[in-house]
Amino acid sequence: MMRPKVKPEHSGYRAQDGTVRLGSVVYGIGVEIEDPTGWVWSLVEAMDGTRTVTELADGVATTHPQVNAAHVAQAVADLYEAGHLEDADAPAPALTPRQVDRYSRGVPLLRWLDRTPRRSAWEMQEALDRARVLLVGLGGTGGYAAQALVTSGVGHLHCVDPDVVGLSNLNRQPLYRERDIGRFKAEVAAEDLGALNSDVEVTCERRLVEGPQDVADLLGGGAGPYDLLLMCADQPPQIRRWANQACLASGTAWVDGGYRGPLATAGVHVPGVGGCWECVRDGEIRRRDLGVAPGEDPAAASPRMPWNPTTAITAGLSGLLVAHAAISLLTGAPPLEPGFLFGVNLAALEDPVLLRSARLPDCPACGDRVNGTMDRAGAGARAVSGTPE
């Protein structure tokens, strides 16, 4: 690092007890550093991007002669590894001036969330610009997710949906208007999303997913391969199981999102890292005591209707959670440990959804009985983080 600089969003202060606090008071970002003699705070104050590490060491030594250059160099390295610093001499972003202006409000949030050592926060926006994402399902969840990803600057988004717009869609599907009733969703979505951000390549197709091979074909054919799959469709009922199978086979990271009554959720899955979708689902079933009879489908404990009760609130929450997980996987900000489901319970905000499962040895999709699945998936999994190798 040539000229270390404390990230503006991580600017620190010295507390009354003498500790140095960086990264704000947001849980998961902030840190507290013991500093009995005050030299760490002197260093933090001096790291404004105008000094090299050698110059920082010389400056600290003038007021704290007991601190040598090695101490300062180690402290700078530790703070950099913890994600609190960037390099004032980092090269300009490999983006157009128009893109720099467009994303000038989003990059600071990525920088705030980021805990990965990197010279510049713009590396994350560059990673988004290179990303290729496949989104299946352009309803409520998928519509909100697609809008968020396009406005955030994902380089290429390919959307798939077979349906036409109906009046009953308009209470929660943001891509469509009354004038669009009867038109194919993919056609309307291409127009709407293309108008949001001309720097993003948006493609859409009318296609019905009828089995795992269809998902595999989408991932690898046509405009593929993709860095990430977003499964936002809820039909057919087996579609998430198919997505899990196809992604395990291809090593593709994926996110599934949706809503059930007051619950809006997203699941994060990376082949070979943590439990797969089946592991998370089965792990939660095993943890719960639903009181259903032996052999009875656990789904009997949840209401079943021909359509899913929803508003723009539950659809929007689920879609934005999907987009957040996607951006986190693509940029590393914030870092996520895959193999979990998270979300919001609108019936009880004090009871958020957070389900995690390690890989289950008897999982029908990735367990030990599945001959070599995890070896193949783990070896073939594509890196989706924007973190430099």
Image: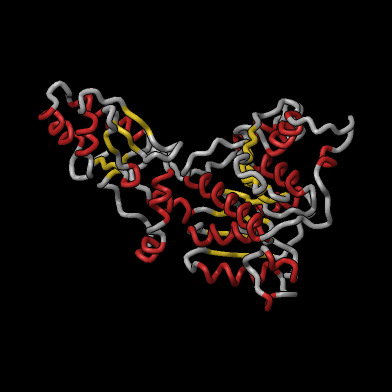
Placement of 237 over or under 1, stated as above or below = below
In this picture, residue 140 sits left or right of residue 150: right
Q: Residue 209 location in percent, x, y?
A: 76, 56
Residue at 46% of width from left, 50% of height from top?
A: 127
In this picture, residue 43 sits left or right of residue 24: left
The picture quadrant where one finds residue 168 is bottom right
Q: Residue most toward the top?
A: 66
**In this view of the protein, which residue sits in the foreground, 282 or 229?**
282
Residue at 59% of width from left, 39% of height from top?
A: 381
**In this view of the protein, which residue sits in the foreground, 338 or 6?**
6
Q: Residue most toward the left?
A: 62
Residue at 23% of width from left, 24% of height from top?
A: 71
Q: Residue 7 location in percent, x, y?
A: 32, 44
In this picture, residue 216 sits left or right of residue 36: right
Placement of 220 over or under 334, stated as above or below = below
Q: Quadrant of the N terminus?
A: top left
Q: Residue most toward the bottom?
A: 179
Placement of 223 over or under 298, stated as above or below = below
In this picture, residue 58 sits left or right of residue 146: left
Question: Can residue 91 be seen in the rendering of this structure?
Answer: yes
**In this view of the protein, which residue sits in the foreground, 37 or 278?**
37
Q: Residue 121 location in percent, x, y?
A: 37, 48
Residue at 26% of width from left, 47% of height from top?
A: 88
Q: Residue 106 location in percent, x, y?
A: 42, 55
